[in-house]
Amino acid sequence: MEDERILALFFERKEQAISETEKKYGNYLAAVAARIVHDQDDVGEILNDTYAAAWNAIPPARPEKLSLYLGKITRALSLNRVRDKKAEKRGGGEAVLCFEELEGVLSGENDPVSALEEKELSRILDDFLSSLPEAERRVFVCRYWYFDPVSEIASRFDYSESKVKMMLLRTREKLKKRLEKENYPI
């Protein structure tokens, strides 16, 4: 079913919207969640929460790209799950490693960030990423958006693991300088 029709079902408040969303995007959303939480029980709960969040947000929201909209919801819910588990007990996994790698660049506080600060950080990150050479940008996004393991990134781009680690270190340093230049609180 096309996204426009699925959105129409949401706007008509028909529960079929959820089943059609699950049919079309369930595997994609499960992959997004699994990459972050690594626990099938959590993945199932996150998917249910994603569908509930979409149901509650549409309408009034009318996403231009439904897959990206749902993916963002799933990613946010997955990250929240990792943070909650980390608070309960120090855990493992790529998401936790990525958080630790970025601790020196971004504030490690778990307080809710104001909408204005969030928007500003988003703008800075967008500008920063677009200023990077393509190879650095792709490696950075694979690591810190998709939480890909360094070994997988190295294999995908035919780099050594040490090269990927060095690229990530240098890119984090560039990001830190950019945030300082923009007077963003680190």
Image (cartoon, rainbow, N blue to C red):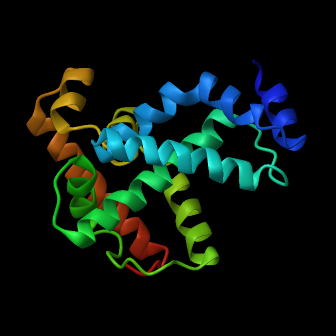
Note whether residue 142 is visible.
Answer: no
Seen in the picture, residue 5 relative to 86 is either above or below; the reply is above
Residue 2 vs residue 16, the one in the foreground: 16
Seen in the picture, residue 109 relative to 54 is either above or below; the reply is below
Residue 165 vs residue 51, the one in the foreground: 51
Question: Quadrant of the rendered structure where residue 127 is?
Answer: bottom right
Note whether residue 99 is visible.
Answer: yes
Where is residue 166 shown, x and y percent of the image? 16, 46
Where is residue 66 shown, x and y percent of the image? 69, 36
Residue 8 vs residue 172, the one in the foreground: 8
Residue 23 vs residue 152, the one in the foreground: 23
Q: Residue furthest front?
A: 15
Looking at the rendered image, the quarter that the N terminus falls into is top right
Q: Residue furthest right?
A: 12
Q: Residue at x 35, y 79 (%)?
A: 109
Question: Quadrant of the rendered structure where residue 16 is?
Answer: top right
Q: Locate residue 35 relative to residue 150 in the image: left or right.
A: right
Seen in the picture, residue 111 relative to 87 is either above or below; the reply is below
Q: Residue at x 35, y 48 (%)?
A: 144
Q: Residue at x 81, y 35 (%)?
A: 7
Seen in the picture, residue 90 relative to 30 is either above or below; the reply is below
Looking at the rendered image, the quarter that the C terminus falls into is bottom left
